[in-house]
Image (spheres, rainbow, N blue to C red):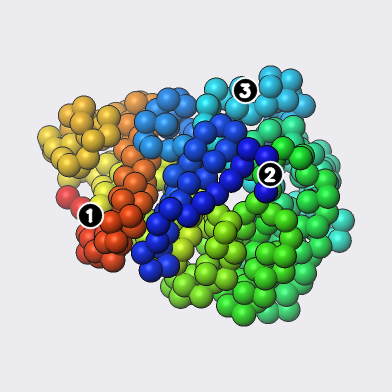
Amino acid sequence: MTPGFSFRVLATDGAARTGLLETAHGPVPTPTFMPVGTQGSVKTLTPGEVAATGARIVLGNTYHLWLRPGAEAVAAHGGLHAFTRWPHAMLTDSGGYQAFSLAERRTVDEDGFVFRSHLDGSRHALTPEEAMRVQGLLGADIAMQLDVCPPGGAPRAELERACATTTRWAKRCLAARRPDQAVFGIVQGGCEVDLRQRHAAELGELPFDGLALGGFSVGEPIEAMHAALPEVAPALDPRRPRYLMGVGTPRDLVTAIAAGVDMFDCVLPTRNARNGQALLRRGRIVIKQSRYKDDRLPLDPECTCPACAGGYARSYLRHLFLAGEILALRLLSEHNLHLYGQLTREAREAIVAGTFSSFRARWTEAGLAGSGESG
């Protein structure tokens, strides 16, 4: 285990578990949701506002920060923590998912990815060694290995090739790691349970500090992911933190926590907020709709986020959103992240109390935020 980094499980309830991730920048109780700070910022919010939602770890995007302002520029400021003024734990992805999404701009071979920048068309080579060098300069508490992320619905032969290449790259990443930076391996295999389990065993033999499930929520039916998780998550070493990458809705989180997952990230709560969508326990509100023009209620009368506790009416938020006022995006973003913080906090409490099944039922019966319109 990397110096200054540790993980221990504190309580379990069925497969669900709560634990404590210790990092050089403080403890992170799990299950935890990581707000996404793609460019070194959770869009529209200050670090203090993000922390007020309960977040104790955020995600930075290696690909984007590598291209702009550059890893060396971040390192000159003392690393990503000092550069962004985020005082708690931080994780950086490897850039592999962005390489996957740049299908028309990149090629891949045994050495890594070669792609053209979306900013200026310049050519870049992302190898396992370069991914670790860049993440080492960024200096997050946790770095991710470079992996191959096949699209949803990929044929089995392609999934098998992705697993094999990811394992070979895993060994190269570990050899090139920064010694004081934790590194997580990434398990691939699509929704093929046997492939996932086999790949989890392969990566579990390597000295990673944690293991992640990549390649979910990339186009496969969501029901397929939900069916696979109870069989795949327990295959990850229980002594190490388990991270489900890029997922997802509150329903996804509850389902994955029940399967034993500890960590999550997703752009959904902040991206949806910027599109005018407030997530609630009971459905969602699309604030631009005319039905809220004269609605004096807050988004959720029971919510304690700044938007709701501050008494901002739905009609006022609608006005701000339609007028293009940034305050609407800020308040909706805080509200949505507050919901995710509340979900993970209640999950931790329920696991300790041995009442996770009733917690899961409450959130499921409520419709799980984002599943439908609420009024």
Q: Quadrant of residue 308?
A: top left
Residue identifier under label 2: 2
- Asked if 68 appears above or below 146 in the picture, the reply is above
Q: Picture coordinates of residue 71 (x, y %)?
A: 74, 31
Q: Is residue 157 left or right of residue 225?
A: right
Q: Picture coordinates of residue 331 (x, y %)?
A: 32, 31
Looking at the picture, tell me which residue is in the foreground, 293 or 343: 343
Type of amino acid under label 3: Phe
Residue at x 57%, y 71% (from the top left corner):
235
* Mark 3 and mark 1 residues within 8 Å of each other at the beta carbon: no
Residue identifier under label 3: 83
Q: Which mark is residue 50?
A: none
Q: Quadrant of residue 256?
A: bottom left
Q: CA distance from mark 3 to mark 1?
A: 38 Å
Q: CA distance from mark 3 to mark 2?
A: 23 Å
At mark 1, the secondary structure is loop
At mark 3, the secondary structure is helix
Type of amino acid under label 1: Arg
Looking at the picture, tell me which residue is in the foreground, 162 or 241: 241
Residue identifier under label 1: 282
Residue at x 58%, y 77% (from the top left corner):
193
Name which of mark 2 and mark 1 comes first in the sequence: 2
**Does residue 53 appear anywhere in the picture?**
yes
Q: Nearer the viewer, mark 3 or mark 1?
A: 3
Residue at x 33%, y 55% (from the top left corner):
352
Type of amino acid under label 2: Thr
Q: Picture coordinates of residue 119 (x, y %)?
A: 71, 36
- Asked if 300 appears above or below 39 in the picture, the reply is below
